[in-house]
Amino acid sequence: MSLQFHRSWMNEELAMWRETAIRFIDNEMLPYDEEARHRGHVGHDLWRKAGAVGLLCSDIPEEYGGGGGDFRHEAVFYEEMARRALSGMNSSVHSIVAHYLLNHGTEAQKRRYLPRMARGELVGAIAMTEPGAGSDLQGVRTRAQRHGDRYLINGSKTFITNGFLAGLVLVVAKTDPAQKAKGMSILIVETEGRPGYQVGRVLDKIGMKAQDTSELFFDDVEVDADCLLGGEEGKGFFQLMSDLPYERTIIGVSAAAAMEGAYEETVRYTRERTAFGQPIGQFQNTRFKLAEIAAHVTAARAYVDRCIEDLVAGRLDTIGASMVKMWASDLQNKVIDECLQLFGGYGYMNEYLIGRMYVDARIQRIYGGTNEIMKEVISRGI
């Protein structure tokens, strides 16, 4: 059966928005996904097409070139991509970058960058992780030193989503290493023609093959002082922490939608696939497994929808967002593993949606802060 939900956050306008997203996905993304998986990125044209339709930065105010909506508009797009295991165009990281600019940037920074991001002219990335610093952001070693009216950036980053195509990178760097967290700042780097800026290889991941994840290198990269996010040094750690609920809710939204897509694909397959003279969906084990999965998916949808409402209302704090990120991504991995088992050997094939969903799901428990870190965050609030 297809699970049906009454979503309290949906309305007629959002339903029409969902149809727009689905048309774009069906016409512009799905037909080229296999090609993008082999290439390792979707290319700039897709970003510009998404921008032309209004699918990028849909919750950024219209005065800065965005769609003027709220997080629900973003969630619709994330859901429809996750249900189809389309990971190549990571509009969520793009939107996270846009929100750092919106929430912490100067007025000039907002007007300079946000309209171009909304149009897909600048693909956004945020360079936090380093070879020796992952979830522990205070271990960042990249330096940004002030020289008059310029900063010189030196260091390297890895696992940077959208890194290969990025035209705008927010670089997390130490402007005063002696101050630890208080010595951290974020620098805005436009990448085109930037001396000293180098994009490394597109990393060979086990999943999310169409998504460009790259290494970035900064060798005396020079930017104007007005490229300091917010215009004040030492605010980087606070800026990063204050926007975590937005990022972690996105992961929960994608997890719930991926579970739904996996469930529906599994139901379809078990009705068509036969063994011992009957559809495998008629065996008790299959029926019971699908019943368990349906219950998990229904619970996840209810919880994630509540978090979407809370985020839009400004009620979702870091602890609540850490909970939904941890729980939903753990459940996503469990549910999709169970679904894959019902496909048998075919589930292990890349040509099957469930196989791609399986390897794509694993990273959800790592990025956005590992689930072990989520437990630490949550426990501090107990």
Image (tube, helix red, strand yellow):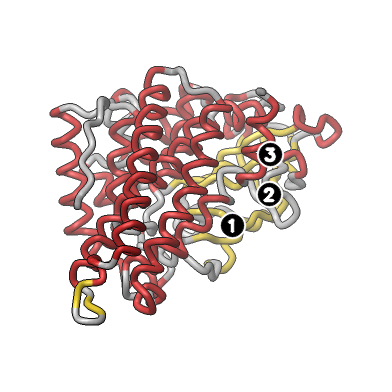
Q: Nearer the viewer, residue 337 or 376?
A: 337
Instruction: Tell me, yes or no, if residue 264 can be seen here.
Output: yes
Residue 227's disc number: none
Front disc: 3 or 1:
1
Instruction: Tell me, yes or no, if residue 86 can be seen here.
Output: no
As helix, strand or loop, the secondary structure at mark 2 comes to: loop
Q: Circle 1 sits on which residue?
A: 159
Q: Circle 2 sits on which residue?
A: 134
| Residue type at the position of mark 1 | Phe
Identify the residue shown where x is 72% and y is 52%: 155
Distance from disc 1 to disc 2, alpha carbons, whole Å, reads 9 Å
Distance from disc 2 to disc 3, alpha carbons, whole Å, reads 24 Å
Q: Circle 3 sits on which residue?
A: 151
Q: Nearer the viewer, residue 61 or 352?
A: 352
Q: Is residue 120 left or right of residue 217?
A: left
Identify the residue shown where x is 34% and y is 38%: 301
